[in-house]
Image (cartoon, helix red, strand yellow):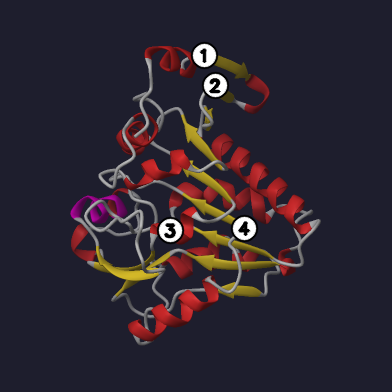
Amino acid sequence: MIKISIFEKDILNTIIHLSRKNLIQYMSNTHLNINIYSDKISTGNAAGEAIENCILKLQATQSMVRIIFAAAPSQDSMFSYLTKSERIDWNKITAFNMDEYIGLESGSEALFSSYLERNLFSRVTITHKNLINPEHNISEELINYSKLLLEAPIDIVCLGIGENGHIAFNDPPVADFNDPETMKVVLLDEKCRVQQVNDGCFETINDVPKQAVTLTIPPLFKANYLFCVVLGVNKSEAVKNTITGPVSTLCPASILTTHVNCKFYFDTAAYSKI
């Protein structure tokens, strides 16, 4: 359990203004790397630059960099930055997605694979991409995709935090920090499904699938570097629980605070309750 003392809270509220980058960085004497920006675009650009630098560092010594990408509106600006990079060699990247809906029509714009195609893959020259296909036999897909993930260590995970504190589709009712599975089928809780409407991905909650495939928490947490981008006031309670609450599956994202190489990127709205 992480407890933040009054002294630590005082330090968390020490503000360094770097107006050139619209950065408001709250410093802590813990290992947490927290970066707060004034708006969504600045937040995404800062995360994108950090991810770009991490990729370049790894590509200097590795033949391939393995990255798991989240697919959500919170990642838009970050992807926009990355796709404009002239330094990343996308042919030396193997990409994965971390979750996918079950039950949507093939090619649906709401599929996470469709999101990644629109916002990332169609804009770069990436050839090594592995996307979860819910149209396959689900049991076989879980086995085959898990094998791909476990072929080698994951270098980077780019993720967000859900309104209910989930990471990927590990909602509180199904989250397990010691999950023995690499992937699983889950029922999405109501708050998770409402978020998809809030994000503009679906018109009504009745349109949101009730089931999905998700990577479990252990394979995400085992990655060498995590970059967590969270935007908007709707996420502020989850951010508060993540950063200041106990490490608990009641807020699955709280486990991120125990990872030695997790960098958080928040806009001021998302960080407003701390």
**Element marked by disc 4:** loop
Q: Earlier in the sequence, mark 1 or mark 4?
A: 1
Q: In the image, residue 193 lies at what x, y percent?
A: 25, 56
Check residue 27 in the rendering and tell me which mark sits there, or answer none: 2
Q: In the image, residue 258 lies at what x, y percent?
A: 46, 40
Where are the magenta residues, as a range? 190-196
Which residue in the protein does label 4 denote?
Answer: 155
Q: In the image, residue 48 lies at what x, y percent?
A: 63, 45
- Verify whether residue 80 appears in magenta: no
Looking at the image, is 59 positioned above or below residue 133?
Answer: above
**Element marked by disc 2:** loop
Q: Amino acid at mark 1?
A: Thr
Please indicate whether residue 76 sits to the left or right of residue 54 in the image. left
Please state which of the two labelled residues, at mark 1 or mark 3, is closer to the viewer: 3
**Distance (Cα) linking label 4 and label 2:** 26 Å
Instruction: Name the quadrant of the C terminus.
Output: top left
Q: Amino acid at mark 2?
A: Met
Q: Earlier in the sequence, mark 1 or mark 2?
A: 1
Looking at the image, is 3 positioned above or below residue 226?
Answer: above
Q: Earlier in the sequence, mark 3 or mark 4?
A: 4
Contact? badges 3 and 2 (CB < 8 Å): no
Check residue 14 in the rendering and tell me which mark sits there, or answer none: 1
Which residue in the protein does label 3 denote?
Answer: 218
Contact? badges 1 and 2 (CB < 8 Å): yes
Please indicate whether residue 205 sits to the left or right of residue 120 in the image. left
**Distance (Cα) linking label 3 and label 2:** 28 Å
Mark 1 nearby-residue class (10 Å; few <14, some 14–19, many ≥20): some
Most common SS among magenta residues: helix
Looking at the image, is 89 positioned above or below residue 151?
Answer: above
**Element marked by disc 1:** loop
